[in-house]
Image (tube, rainbow, N blue to C red):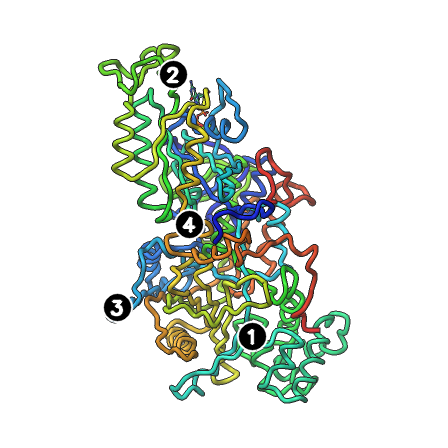
Amino acid sequence: METLDGTEWDVVIAGTGLPQSLLALSLSRSGKSVLHLDRNDYYGGNEAALSLSEARDWATKHAATGEEAHNTTFSHATIQENAVEEGGIKLSQPRAYSLALAPHVIHAQSKLLAALVSSRMHNQLEFQAVGSWFLAEPLSENDGSRSHITRVPSGREDIFRDNTFDLRAKRSLMKFLRFVQNYEEQPQAWQSDAERPFPDFLQQKFGLPPSSHGALLSLTLLPSAANSTSTGSALPLIARHLRSIGVFGPGFGAVLPKWGGLAEIAQVACRAGAVGGGVYVLKKGIDSISSASEDHIKLVLSDGEKITTRWLAGCSDDLPPIGTREITGRMTRSISIVTPPLVQLFPPTSEGGVTPAGAVVIVPSSTADEPPVQIVAHSHESGECPSTQSVLYGSVALPYEQGKTHLAAAVEAVLQGYEESSHHSLWSLCYHQNNVREERGPSTNTIVLAHAPLELGLSDSTFDEVKLAWQQITGETEGFMVFEAREGMEDDD
Amino acid sequence: MSDSPAPSAPKPSSSVKLVLLGEAAVGKSSLVLRFVNDAFEPNKEPTIGAAFLTQKCNLPNRTIKFEIWDTAGQERFASLAPMYYRNAQSALVVYDITKASSLVKAKHWIAELQRQASPGIVIALVGNKLDLVEDEEEGEAQEGEGEGEGEEDGKVRRVSTKEGKDYADEENLLFFETSAKSGHNVNEVFTAIANAIPETSLKGPRGGAGGATQAALGSGAQDNSRVNLNANADAGPKEGCAC
Ligand SMILES: Nc1nc2c(ncn2[C@@H]2O[C@H](COP(=O)(O)OP(=O)(O)OP(=O)(O)O)[C@@H](O)[C@H]2O)c(=O)[nH]1
Ligand SMILES: [Mg+2]
């Protein structure tokens, strides 16, 4: 194998997560020489998709629980494999799974989707619908018997057909939904309440009863407790949800990338980046950074090789500390492989429409001061598990011990929510994730990108930040992620 | 599922990801060029990084659209292949029948694919540059001559047909000897791969995962879970919109 020692680059990018992979691709297509490194022996970084055996290795690597776990992205990882009764469905071979560390829901109007189309990357990707949103009964109100899971009405007809609301509530709900559609144009109706808890706003301004708050909060995909969710943060997200519905087909507004969440997008970007001339090296990290001259940075790689580059970009996990680090989000998360498949979560969203592969289940907490458990369910159609199973990705904004208990109870509530109560979990991984943010260091040609956000509804922040980095490095303003068709690379029919 | 679709009905079509692996200069890109453009370049440049091409393959009952990832054999840091064989339904591992070391490298790739790639991946082993030895006795490897001798002309076979074939049989691989130069057996390789892809895995390369989506295949319908990101032009917010 060749050595990198002494090589010079326009840009060195550390880590192959989604932000870095999009940046590497866009720069390689702008004629920059790009060296894309990952200290891991797999692609995808914090957004990777893992087989069962990879997940086992990953958990071992991120098992720390002490001091050192405070400032790292992943910690506390533990795997539980449950015994299978005689003749029951067992786990399949490890590679039959592709478990997503980033099972984000992507709304139709997300800038990322538009960029995937303008860069023609969408031809290499497969997207599936996230069809329905569900609300489970709050955790402690469940007396141990069957829990209730109700579908959140997703449109006008749905609301009228719904029998959980009385006529007055239905009218208030319709009024609220009409307001959200163009809330920006009516600042007088909400701006003075922007900082107030959203439930209060719903109750006081629209007369919406508390029984309807959960449904509306679920559409935001915010991890915060009801009482800590501000009106100003909830409104744009509910608007995002409503405005996305129908864009790619009737009855749904969000999608997921098949084969393991954001990992697949990152991977496709890397593939295209290599075709665009980027050089890819796994199992190599960056040990130290020093400035070689005014516009050159000297890097020492993990195996001692020294290289120089004009620009360095990466997320804080893949760079030696440059500036001050700060934790901007904390979440306890779980991945559960369950059987038999939870087909009830994936009803068709319209006649003759696509079969959804994803669903969202919100399990509210018993008090409005505690955060809900959010579960993104993927059916086997996502390619992440065999057809006899489904995968539940849970997350809750609580510290590990407490979070783990809430997650386990919430997953159990989903599994017990249906008549055929033989649903059970075969395998689960639980871990804690910090969102580590780093302020830019003194060097002006080092760019620290934010990690993909923890919130399950993928915001445009990742896209915006990568675009900014691309503009900074190339000096261009237009044309980010807009690529011409290449020879031999035809579009889909 | 009907065996003979109505003449007017379009044949069901599905995409198949294929990754090409093998030592440098064995003829991977030349095989793709022959398959895609029916052409040959005597002095083809080495691939840098990777290349992507597509080509349709018409079978009696369906059309397979190959999405071909052609990797560089002289890949400098041995890190590229994993990103291409992930989720690939097929792999074409190429060696040069006039170069024994290239079969060693091919075996290395096959072992890696069997260890790391999708469980149901269809692998074809291909011994290329058959035209160079065609006047020689069929399938006999020349013994005793040092590697690298007679580089320019007078290429001799270093890997017998039997050696390649036996190994392929042992590992359950498709096997062909080809010439990208003459075109011999090139379409046959791709057709054989297309035929070997189990119908159930056409939308789901992983064993057992995602097969059921294809229930509609026989009727010519597309994968019914796939969302078309270009659909917004004709769709627009419809039913389901709350206001
Ligand atoms: N005689 C003969 N020459 C061939 C054949 N296939 C390829 N070549 C020649 O072998 C050389 C290498 O071919 P490529 O197709 O570039 O090989 P490759 O495997 O793609 O090489 P890398 O991209 O470096 O990995 C070129 O000069 C080709 O013209 C063949 O079937 N017969
Ligand atoms: Mg080549």
Q: Amino acid at mark 1?
A: Ser
* Image point (48%, 77%), residue name: A363
Q: Which quadrant of the picture is home to ligand 1?
A: top left
The chain under label 4 reads B
- In the picture of the structure, the residue carrying the numbered disc 4 is B205
Q: Are marks 1 and 3 on the same chain?
A: yes
Q: Which residue is mark 3?
A: A87
The chain identifier of the residue carrying mark 3 reads A
Q: Foreground mark, 4 or 3?
A: 3
Given the image, what chain letter belongs to the residue carrying mark 1?
A
Q: Residues within 10 Å of mark 3 (few under 14, many from 20)?
A: few
Q: Which mark is residue B112?
A: none
- The response on whether ligand 1 sits within 8 Å of label 2 is yes
The residue to which callout 2 is attached is B132
Q: Are marks 1 and 2 in contact (CB under 8 Å)?
A: no
- Is label 1 in a helix, a strand or a loop? helix
Residue A98, given in percent of the width and then of the height, sits at 40, 56
Q: Nearer the viewer, residue B235 or A255?
A: B235
Residue A471 can be seen, yes or no: no
Which image quarter: residue A430?
A: bottom left
